[in-house]
Image: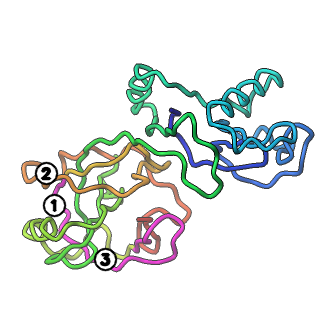
């Protein structure tokens, strides 16, 4: 099992989890990496697909992993390269899963006997999830038949900021939520905002603003972007009529400018 941190990027020799995915002119050690760019690339290697001209994709993972570790040892690789931690020890796994507060999103795992299969999702994910409260600021669908909820939290300056959207609500849940919602009033804090359907999408959601006085509890994974928004859709858990918006945790990280910040004339990414 490996700690789950960032999206993977496959390259010529090593399979890595990388913060930057760029094309580079070759060096002798790694055909895709330029030395002058190495300081800007941070990657954790977790698989070995080719070794000294030998294709290793047919090897079982335990053998590829052993070869990968030997490459790091023999070539004395150091930053920006790092060997992604790996274990088969249950106690170590439980310890890793306790690191959510410092950004650990979960684990990826596969059978030790598995060969590498191109274009096949061979790794399975286990994400750390938690429940948290948020304010309903808008819906897709209609207030009488909501399909998804657009969620917000107040920032340190008292502005209601968009933090994420739920997955599609079950019909029974939508009916129950509709009984709690009220139409948005004049001067709603999200008036004039537009919301994209997802990260990198140009599609805009058709939303209806509602009175931001209702609090719900949702299940979320711990992955957040630089603005403090949830990177993945939240899952409905329950309504919290016992809480007011002031009881909801504050969004402590201010949104960045540049097109993803919600506000008049700006877009909020859903």
User: Which residue in the protein does label 3 denote?
Assistant: 207
The answer to whether 37 appears left or right of 99 in the picture is right
The answer to which of marks 1 and 3 sits earlier in the sequence is: 3
Q: Identify the residue at horizontal 54%, vertical 53% (top origin).
A: 121
**Helix, strand or loop at disc 2?**
loop
- Quadrant for residue 66, please give it: top right
**Could you tell me what secondary structure mostly forms the magenta stretch?**
loop
Q: Residues within 10 Å of mark 2 (few under 14, many from 20)?
A: some
Answer whether labels 2 and 1 touch (C-beta < 8 Å): yes
- Residue 244 is marked as 2
Q: Residue at x 32, y 74 (%)?
A: 191
Disc 1 marks which residue?
A: 213
Residue 106 vertical placement versus 147 (above, below)? above
Q: Quadrant of residue 68?
A: top right
Give the residues drawn in magenta, as a range. Answer: 194-216
Compare residues 148 and 227 and report the one nearer the observer.
148
Circle nearer the N terminus (2, 3): 3
Name the front one of labels 2 and 3. Answer: 3
Q: Looking at the image, which is closer to me, 110 or 37?
A: 110
> Along the horizontal axis of the image, is 237 left or right of 42?
left
- Residue 20 screen position, x and y as percent: 68, 49
Mark 2 → mark 3, Cα distance in angstroms: 23 Å
State the separation of the CA atoms marked 1 and 3: 17 Å
């Amino acid at each position: 099992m490996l700690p789950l941190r960032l999206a993977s990027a496959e390259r010529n020799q090593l399979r890595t989890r990388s913060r930057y995915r760029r094309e580079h002119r070759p060096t002798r050690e790694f055909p895709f990496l330029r030395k002058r760019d190495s300081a800007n690339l941070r990657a954790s290697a977790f698989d070995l697909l080719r070794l000294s001209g030998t294709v290793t994709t047919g090897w079982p993972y335990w053998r590829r992993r052993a070869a990968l570790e030997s490459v790091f040892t023999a070539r004395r690789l150091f930053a920006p390269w790092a060997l992604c931690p790996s274990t088969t020890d249950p106690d170590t796994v439980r310890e890793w899963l306790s690191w959510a507060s410092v950004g650990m999103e979960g684990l990826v795992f596969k059978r030790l006997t598995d060969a590498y299969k191109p274009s096949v999702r061979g790794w399975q994910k286990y994400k750390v999830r938690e429940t948290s409260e948020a304010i309903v600021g808008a819906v897709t669908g209609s207030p009488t038949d909501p399909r998804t909820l657009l969620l917000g939290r107040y920032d340190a300056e008292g502005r209601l900021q968009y933090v994420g959207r739920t997955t599609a609500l079950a019909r029974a849940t939508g009916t129950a939520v509709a009984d709690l919602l009220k139409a948005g009033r004049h001067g709603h804090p999200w008036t004039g905002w537009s919301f994209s359907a997802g990260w990198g999408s140009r599609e805009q959601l058709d939303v209806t603003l509602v009175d931001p006085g209702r609090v719900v509890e949702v299940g979320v994974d711990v992955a957040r972007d630089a603005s403090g928004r949830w990177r993945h859709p939240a899952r409905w858990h329950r309504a919290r009529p016992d809480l007011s918006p002031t009881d909801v945790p504050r969004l402590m990280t201010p949104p960045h400018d540049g097109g993803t910040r919600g506000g008049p004339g700006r877009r909020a990414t859903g």
